[in-house]
Image: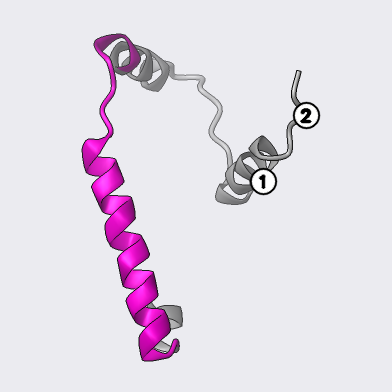
């Protein structure tokens, strides 16, 4: 929020619009029963491996750079 407050009014409006679009997308997104079951199964694993926020960002960034197979 501190960073957004430092933006110009036009940039703040654009950021707010992008956030609203994102929230609308989340509202329209739903999981199938099988996907919910898989999430629950994974969360129930006591030895599951968690990754840092930085590692998650790096993995997401690499998704767009994968060569077509």
The residue tagged 2 is: 67
Of 55 and 60, nearer the camera is 60
Tell me where residue 6 sits by quadrant.
bottom left
Magenta segment main secondary structure: helix
Vertical order, 43 against 22 (above or below): above
Quarter placement of the N terminus: bottom left
Could you tell me which residue is drawn at 78 percent across and 29 percent down?
Answer: 67
Could you tell me which residue is drawn at 28 percent across and 42 percent down?
Answer: 26
Which colour style is shown?
A: one colour
Could you tell me which residue is drawn at 36 percent across and 20 percent down?
Answer: 39
Instruction: Work out how far the residue at label 1 is from the one at label 2, CA to CA, in angstroms.
Output: 16 Å
Could you tell me which residue is drawn at 26 percent across and 28 percent down?
Answer: 30
Residue 63 in percent (x, y) is at 65, 36
Quarter placement of the C terminus: top right
Of 20 and 34, nearer the camera is 20
Please rate how many residues cluster around mark 2, counting C-alpha atoms within 10 Å: few if below 14, some from 14 to 19, many from 20.
few
Residue stretch in magenta? 7-35
Sequence-wise, which precedes: disc 1 or disc 2?
1
The residue tagged 1 is: 58
Instruction: Return the residue found at the far left.
Output: 27
Vertical order, 66 against 22 (above or below): above
């Amino acid at each position: 929020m501190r960073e957004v407050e430092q933006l110009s009014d036009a940039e703040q409006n654009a950021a707010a619009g992008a956030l609203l679009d994102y929230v609308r997308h989340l509202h329209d997104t739903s999981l199938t029963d099988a996907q919910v079951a898989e999430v629950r199964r994974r969360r129930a694993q006591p030895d599951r491996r968690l990754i840092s926020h930085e590692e998650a960002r790096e993995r997401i960034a690499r998704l767009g750079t994968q060569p077509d197979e």
